[in-house]
Image (cartoon, helix red, strand yellow):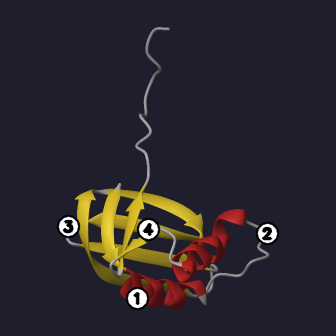
Amino acid sequence: MEVVIDRDAFLKGLQMVQNIVEPRQTLPILANVLLEAEGESVRMTATDLEVGARVSVPAKVGGKGAITVSARKLAEIVKQGDGERDGEFAVRWCDLPTGRPGPR
């Protein structure tokens, strides 16, 4: 997944869904936000199993994909501006192959 997104728009959308996330969950995945990059937007989704929120933010998507990350940690990184260049924030994660491993 490879995305270039406006930092302020990303942070605003992330803060909207982060309000749903509880830091101390019985299910750790509920402390995460789902990021889905496809087309010309990034969709952020969070839930606490009672309430859910989904926000879509325009972005330049170089490679589509989806990942869950800690909502609080990601918000801290974006607030600090790590990865920021000229008001844009670059998000890049590696692709992990699925299926059977090849020969060694």
Disc 4 to disc 2: CB gap under 8 Å: no
Q: Is residue 6 shown above or below 66? A: below
Q: Which residue is drawn at 47% across and 20% down?
A: 101
7 with respect to 62 (left or right): right
Disc 4 vs disc 1: which is toward the camera? Answer: 1
- Name the kind of residue labelled 1 in the image: Asp
Q: Residue at x 44, y 68 (%)?
A: 35
Does dot 3 land on a helix, a strand or a loop?
loop
Q: Mark 3 points at which residue?
A: 39
- Name the kind of residue labelled 4 in the image: Leu
Does dot 4 land on a helix, a strand or a loop?
strand
Q: Name the residue under label 2.
A: 26
- Name the kind of residue labelled 2 in the image: Thr
Badge 2 density bin: few <14, some 14–19, many ≥20, Cα 10 Å? few
Q: Mark 1 points at which residue?
A: 8
Q: Residue at x 33, y 57 (%)?
A: 2
